[in-house]
Amino acid sequence: METLNYRFEHGSRALTAQPQVVGVVGSGNLEVLIEAADLGGACSIEIQTAAVGFGAIWQAVMHDFQQRWQLADARISINDMGATPAVVSLRMDQAVQTMLGDAA
């Protein structure tokens, strides 16, 4: 297992809904927990992954995600069992859309 942590400063979209969990930890999939948190306008992402050595790919996917959503005061926790970058992006977008509801 590997733990990766990312923090993106100066987001512009705050979340106000209750925490949400999307996805299921399983072979080739992942679980995303997203919640509002007082982080001074930042978005923090912690990833627990079984796929060791893919930090550069995770960094690129997380950067792309934050560019798309510009989250502020958000904490995201990911439990991964080898999901592909496309599945990661899908689940993360699904988590934000669940939090934002019709405002997405």
Image (cartoon, rainbow, N blue to C red):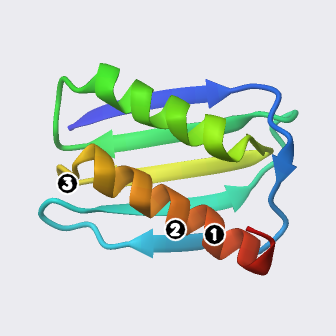
Q: Residues within 10 Å of mark 3 (few under 14, many from 20)?
A: some
Task: Decide which of tag 2 and tag 3 comes sooner along the chain.
Answer: 3
Q: Quadrant of residue 38?
A: top right
Q: Which amino acid does label 3 sit on?
A: Met
Seen at 85% across and 35% down, the residue is 41
The residue under label 3 is 81
Q: Position of residue 23 (x, y in %)?
A: 37, 72
Instruction: Classify the position of the C terminus by image quarter.
Output: bottom right
Q: In the rendered structure, find residue 94 and report the number of the disc placed on it.
A: 2
Q: Residues within 10 Å of mark 1 (few under 14, many from 20)?
A: some
**In the depicted structure, whether residue 95 falls above or below residue 42:** below
Q: Say whether marks 1 and 2 touch (CB < 8 Å).
A: yes
Residue placed furthest toward the left:
27
Say whether residue 19 is visible.
no
**In the depicted structure, whether residue 101 falls above or below residue 83:** below
The residue under label 1 is 97
Residue placed furthest toward the bottom:
102
Q: Residues within 10 Å of mark 2 (few under 14, many from 20)?
A: some
Instruction: Classify the position of the N terminus by image quarter.
Output: top left
Q: Position of residue 72 (x, y in %)?
A: 80, 42
Instruction: Compare residues 85 and 22 and report the one nearer the observer.
Output: 85
Q: Quadrant of residue 16?
A: bottom right
Seen at 18% across and 23% down, the residue is 53
Say whether residue 94 is visible.
yes
